[in-house]
Amino acid sequence: MGERVQKSLINAKVNLLFYFLSLFFSFYSRKIFLDCLGIDFIGLTGTLGNILGYLNLAELGIGGAVSIFLYKPLLQKDRRSIQEILSLLGFLYRRIGLFIGAAGILVSLFFPLIFSQADLSLGIVYFVFYSFLGSSLIGYFINYRQILLTADQKNYLVSIYFQSAGLIKTALQIWLAYKFKNLYVWVAIEFIFSVFACIILNWRINREYPWLVTNPKNGKELLEKYPSIIKNTKQIFIHKFKDFLLTRSDELFIFVFVSLKMVAFYGNYLMIVNKVTLLINSALDSTLAGVGNLVAEGDKKNMMKVFWELMAIRHFFAGLFCFSIYNLLEPFISLWLGPEYILNHSILVMLLIYTYIANSRGVVDMFNHSHGLYADTWSAWVEVIINISITFIVGYFYGLFGILLGKIVSVTIIVIFWKPYYLFSSGFKLPISTYWNGTIKYYLINGFSFISAYLVSSHFVKISISSFLDLVIYGIIIVGLYLIINILLMYFFGKGTRSLIKRFIK
């Protein structure tokens, strides 16, 4: 098994381990914090976190742009170039940090107005905000070198140190919240552990790369040497801003065209879908640095082999995920919250169509990123225009269905048709028919598997679901049936499946 595959597997295992640990802690800790610290305080931390999220928009693009330029010098062991690129990143991040710090101070001047109706004192509001702001600025002034671990397929080290510190921090906050019920103590622990994780991670980076010396003060000179980084940053920023804009607009559109109540109803569906999507991405996104290393190597034959292997994995999990959610989400909602929280079935269908596209697109996105293909900034604006236009026209008459239709049409045009064409024409330099000859099989295989397993289970699997145990048993049977059909079809007809299996059984 190759070194790239081994590193990807290590990253995936570590990400999955911390995913499940964090999932457990998030549900358990939220209950404790709500009971011991109060709903107003938890709402305050969420609100201030969102404010910082908007301020951090200033970073969108730089980290991604720099990682592209690290793959080749890492492959060639060009230490000088690595040090120069990271020095340039440090220079740019310090400027961003100063901007975010100044913007944060400016925004905080309006807190007496913004939180005039809050039941919490302005003292705790400012203490929380500046603690969060300080934690955020650490990443810009000190932790910028961690991108080298990510580009070098050692992101598991980042996960181990940051996630471990996060879990210990949460456990300590749970105990202190239960014992003292003090808001200031909770916030202080939040900031202290951010500093602690930063110190430990930088110690590990120094051990991993003892030759690494960066000097952000040389940033202005390095800008002239690496002008492509700024060019790519501007391009990536537009694409990231588009994603941010469309993601944050969903709840607003539902509120405007449907109701505030529907925001909560749809939020239940979305929370479950997002948790499972995060699970898939925790495992599969660990291959990004490996793909970057592969593209830097320039072996087109090996590149295409890996491309089809990753496509097989992505479409397999996208199909499995959508089949499972289609059959299990509604009975789960009914048992969890009550049947009154189940939405029209067409909403579930539309949500899963969009989710399939979102989960299967990852491979094309990875290779586009690794090739630095972000010059199609027009496609970001086209996606936004299509999405918003359909949402305003159809959403007005059909509510949530129309809002989801806008998302599906926009990503179909840009993600399904344009992005693969852009990759194959500008990256691989191959005809787009090569892509569709392989990809269309995945759509047919998953479609046939879905319909076949659904029809068989509908006629022969008769289980009355009145408890979570019944739901688990039903899920095991129908998902097992789907897997048997899908795996057989993927093995015999899916491009890249057999070479993927051979890679893991060597």
Image (cartoon, rainbow, N blue to C red):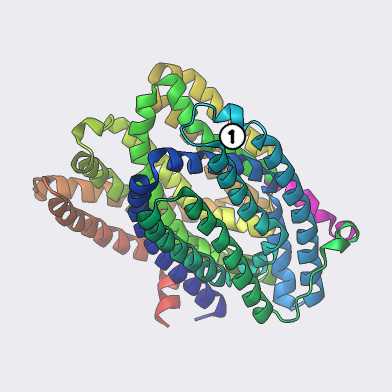
Helix, strand or loop at mark 1:
helix
Q: Position of residue 459 (x, y in %)?
A: 11, 46
| Residue lying furthest top | 397
Q: Residue at x 29, y 49 (%)?
A: 323
Q: Quadrant of residue 335?
A: top left
- The residue carrying pointer 1 sits among few (fewer than 14), some (14 to 19) or many (20 or more) residues within 10 Å by Cα, namely many
Q: Which residue is mark 1?
A: 383
Residue 69 is situated, as x and y percent measured from the top left of the image, at 74, 63
Tag 1: residue type?
Glu
Residue sitting nearer the eye, 363 or 156: 156
Main SS class of the magenta portion in the image? helix
Q: Decide: is 94 above or below 128.
A: below
Q: Is residue 80 above or below residue 28?
A: below
At 30% across and 63% down in the image, what residue appears?
488
- Percent across and percent down for residue 107 are 66, 35
Q: Can the viewer see residue 352 in this picture?
A: no
| Quadrant the C terminus occupies | bottom left
Residue 268, given in percent of the width and then of the height, sits at: 33, 39
- Residue stretch rendered in magenta on the structure: 223-236
